[in-house]
Image (spheres, rainbow, N blue to C red):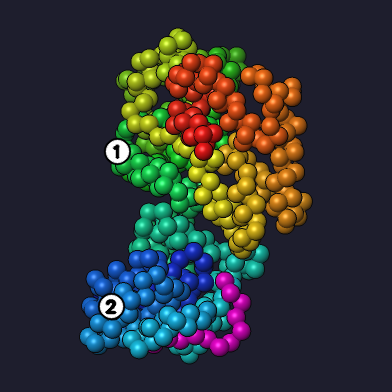
Amino acid sequence: MTKMPITNTSGRTIVITGWGWKEYAVAAAVALRALGAATDVMGMSKRRLPEFLEEHGGDRRAIYIVGVALGGDAERLAKVLSSLRGGGTKVVWISSIPMDESLKKILSPFIEIFETKAKQDLFNGALVKATGEYFKEDVSDVMPFAKEGAAIPKSVPRYHDLISAAMYAYRNYRDEETYSAAIRHLACKVSEEAWSDKCREAVAHYHRYGGRELVGDSKAVKDLRERINLVAASPDARVLILGESGTGKETVALQIHTRSQRRNEPFLAYNCASVAPQLLESAFFGHEKGAFTSAESKKPGLFELANGGTLFLDEIGELPLEAQGILLRVLETRRFMRVGGTVELETDVRLITATNRHLPTMVREGKFRADLYMRINVATLDIPPLRDRPEDIARIADSWWLNRFYRHLSDEQKAALAEYSYPGNVRELFNILERAVVFKENDFSKLIAEHRQINAELQPEPETAECGEALPDNLDEAIRLHVKHVVDKNDGNISRAAVALGITRTTLRKWLQNSRS
């Protein structure tokens, strides 16, 4: 193994690799080992590659592209590669998957293309072997780090954690430094004890938050991500998250926390409906020993434990009026006392709350304090239900499946999942996928049919809707019929109908539009 110092350089040679599979990082480490310490390394997407080559390619003597597909605008790529070649920059593309022949014909005059001819096990080290073949490097020592799923050897879990954490940081925060450092550590076989502080922090952060990402490419989700980023940039602003049950309100709260300056501080989630009202003050502020019969020792509360970080209160609409007043006081003063205590404590937390209830109606009905509503509603995020973004269904399901089995769902399975409306939202989609795993069911059309039957048995009788029309068997049609009936019942008033249905006005309008189309 060639040893090289772990340094950040501005070398004339760079290795560009993809992300999403561990073998990309491992293949880049092989290239880095072969090229030497003065080589830079960077993770990049296919979409971003042409722009990078146009802006920075001319500064390099050699560019090795490992695990990034060449596609999209072929003419644009050919133009920039031709310019680089004319300027004396060597560009090499290494892959275990052959380039499309039409694309190869366009790009081959300007780039060295290396495609291994050996039979490869895709996504379990094929690219690593191809890179070793190009550089004439022995890759047997790093192959265990390129394995996925059940193939991961038990003797090498920590480097797998590091690569996964680095990819997570790159994917969620565009943290290129950690991804590059992880690849460089692997190239040098740096022991865990000698990892950089940034890499160790990335692994700890990934262990805590890595399983909770906001998945989807619909406009609604893209807009939501943009608003999350804006809210996260203000680490003290209170946030109210609205959305139906199962839409992922806690995931959104976690996204706000992990993108904010508070990301290295505690994140605590608490369901306001999970404890008896008389115990809420103790849950919020803690208690001293002997404060009440069962208080056998001192216990800190949520505001004390979350100090410096983020406190997420789910189902805030279930909070009793008395507890609302207690919460309001700490939000106004940032100070509190433990139950049975005599010393006032100070807290610095960002409060994020969530509900699937219509709080303005609760305020009008005297069930929720208007002053507390104003305090918690500095910034509002509305999570669209899954039925309003059906284009995300396949992506969410495929991501869930990929994380567990390291393989994609088939097109037929994705299409079958997209045929259902998911009144239970993302939570219901995950439930169906788990059922597929339990029963080893690969026929997702059959799975969805069975799920519809189960849900139909949960629907109330009678056979006809209140408006006298026959209730259709199709769940979506039944919902549209009911929505129209409730709107008519409320004299066409969208706001009142939305409150009665327990949904947002935006969702109600979409159901009405669907019923007209």
**Residue at x-position 23% and y-position 78%:** 59
Magenta residues span 112-123
**Residue at x-position 39% and y-position 77%:** 65
Q: Position of residue 427 (x, y in %)?
A: 60, 40
Q: CA distance from mark 2 to mark 1?
A: 40 Å
Residue 121 highlighted magenta (yes or no): yes
For residue 185, what is the image quadrant? bottom left
**Residue at x-position 34% and y-position 22%:** 375
Q: Position of residue 511 (x, y in %)?
A: 52, 33
The reply to whether callout 2 and callout 1 are in contact (CB within 8 Å) is no
Does residue 403 appear to the left or right of 438 in the view shown?
Answer: left
Q: Residues within 10 Å of mark 1 (few under 14, many from 20)?
A: few
Residue 476 drawn above or below residue 336: below
Nearest the camera: 146 or 396? 396
**Residue at x-position 50% and y-position 44%:** 389
Q: Secondary structure at mark 1?
A: loop
For residue 458, what is the image quadrant? top right
Residue 369 drawn above or below residue 58: above
Q: Identify the residue under disc 1.
A: 234
Q: Amino acid at mark 1?
A: Ser
**Mark closest to the chain's N terminus, 2 or 1:** 2
For residue 449, what is the image quadrant? top right
Q: Position of residue 383 (x, y in %)?
A: 46, 37
> Furthest residue to the top?
366
Q: Identify the residue under disc 2.
A: 80
Total residue callouts: 2
> Is any part of residue 454 visible from this angle?
yes
Does residue 330 appear to the left or right of 417 in the view shown?
Answer: left
Depth check, mark 2 against mark 1: the one in front is 2
Q: Position of residue 64 (x, y in %)?
A: 37, 80
